Amino acid sequence: MEKAAASRTGKAAASRTEKAAASRTGKAAASRTEKTAASRTGKAAASRTEKTATSRTGGTPAASRADDGRGGRGVAPKRRSRRLVGGLRVRLVVTFVVVALISAVTATALAYRDARTAVLQRTQNAAVNDLRERVTAVAADFDVPPDQQSLSRFAARVSDGLGGNIVVARYQDLSAVSDSLADTRARITTELRTAVTTGDGAQFQRVRWRGDPYLVVGTPVTFADGDRRTSGLEVFAITDLRAERDDTTALLDSVRTGMVPVVVLAAVLALLAAGTVLRPVRKLGRATRELAAGDLGSRVAVSGHDELADLARTFNETADALQASDTELREQEAKARRFVADVSHELRTPLAAMTMVATVLEEDADQLPPDAARAARTVGAETARLSRLVEDLMEISRFDAKAVRLNAAEADLADTVRASLALRGWTDRVRTELPEGLRAVVDRRRIDVIVANLVGNALRHGAPPVTVTLATAPGADGEWVTLEVADHGPGLPPGTGERVFDRFYKADTARTRGAADDTGQGSGLGTAIALENARLHGGTIEAADGPRGGAVFTLRLPLRPMREDTE
């Protein structure tokens, strides 16, 4: 049982007329009892016996436990919210509810503690004062030493004046109880008896007996002759605190009931606040996604002057700058394409004349002096290379302008590859695995450009044997035809797999300009044109190192009928 500290109250003197009468007749004086319950703290106090009773003046263990328990329940949703898979709305709602719940729990605990302390303080003060006054009135006619019968009458008279509370009167070895059926030994503890015997004022203690709270007040009775001698008579009154307990419990229940609308209101306010905050955030997110998808005209309406408005304004400014940059880049790119196309077109006429002159010079080179013959042949080769470069530039320009035309017709792919190799005299230098009867709808001229580029690169930069393999392979959307060109050279340099199809890219930067041949290579545009031709057929070209060394270029085309298209 938790023991409440016994406090001392001020003594009250008996009336002077009764004091004189008591000294002449040898009767016991009225007891000097306490006026207040907690004035002195330096004297001996009774130990606490009540297990769940509250503390002496303020916050009680029970209240603390109630606070801890409900506080724990208030924090639990916050911990659970960390595990929820949700966005800012969920976090805002949970935060509002948790703050409201913690606030309500804290207010409830404080209100319960203060109300319980006030109720118990008022009850114990009233009990001490009532016992003091009643003992003063009854002790005036009480003779000391008493016998058992007079002691019983004394206890009964004191109990009658206290509203029927159980009263125990003790004098040395004698003891009398106002209610003979009441069990008082468990409620009047040894600590309280010792405190009353050794003290000079009223003592009280809150105890719990059979699950119910009680307040036990004890006081010694002193003679009224002014010397404050104790008469040996001790009086204990037992007050039932169940009514006070019910009152504080009812208060706690009412406060708990009031917490429900508080939490609901907090959740509603959180939803409103989340909507106010998240609405512009959602609009900004939608505009950002549209901007990322390519809609550079996406903007956010700016309203207000808060941080979200500043964020929307910054987004609009960024989108404006990005759109302006994109427009400028597109205009520059279009100008560059027109410039390349125009230059290439304008160079065709003078190049045609230069080619004719170079051809005549090469035909007569044997009749010229050695130095002049060598110069004539060099001019012829460079003129031919320049002509091929111009043609490549014009071809790339047509791809960029989406002005190429696919002249597709059904063709035997094996025959197409053989014709391309024979045209360039590579039949004896290349091993082929070309199954017969593999037909597809393709543009033979563009397939010839692809084969010439891939095989030419393998012969120039790889090592024999160079193999060309034609086969079919299943795909997710139908059957595909593959043309694999492999060599046994050093393979692709590290880091060039993704750049090998870039325009004007050369893996071997030390190559001389004279390395060009009739395949159109040497300009750095051959692989780029080959890839564009493959894409025009709905396919692609992949570059990788072979399992046994060397580079492997694989052309993949859909094996399905295609119609003429303009891209």
Image (spheres, grey):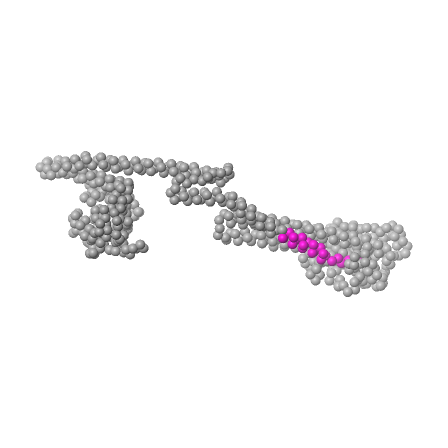
- Front-most of 156 and 434? 434
Q: Where is residue 63 in the image (x, y as percent from the top left)?
A: 65, 53
Note whether 331 is above or below 96 in the view shown.
Answer: above
Q: Where is residue 275 in the image (x, y as percent from the top left)?
A: 51, 45
- Quadrant location of residue 359? top left
- Which quarter shows the N terminus? bottom right
Residue 99 visible in the current orientation: no
Looking at the image, residue 502 sits to the left or right of residue 189; the answer is left
- Which quarter shows the C terminus? top left
Note whether 500 is above or below 344 in the view shown.
Answer: below
Q: Position of residue 364 (x, y in %)?
A: 10, 37
Looking at the image, residue 16 sits to the left or right of residue 75; the answer is right
Q: Where is residue 407 in the image (x, y as percent from the top left)?
A: 23, 46
Total labels: the figure holds 0
Q: Is the magenta stretch mostly helix, strand or loop?
A: helix
As for residue 345 lying within the magenta part, the answer is no
Q: Tell me what residue is drawn at x 58 percent, y 50 percent.
A: 263
Note whether 288 is above or below 23 in the view shown.
Answer: above
Note whether 103 is above or below 233 in the view shown.
Answer: above
As for residue 239 lying within the magenta part, the answer is yes
Looking at the image, residue 252 sits to the left or right of residue 312; the answer is right
Q: Tell me what residue is drawn at x 71 percent, y 57 percent.
A: 242
Residue 355 visible in the current orientation: yes
Magenta residues span: 235-257
- Front-most of 512 and 458? 458
- Quadrant location of residue 389? top left
Report the residue that reaches farthest toward the bottom.
181
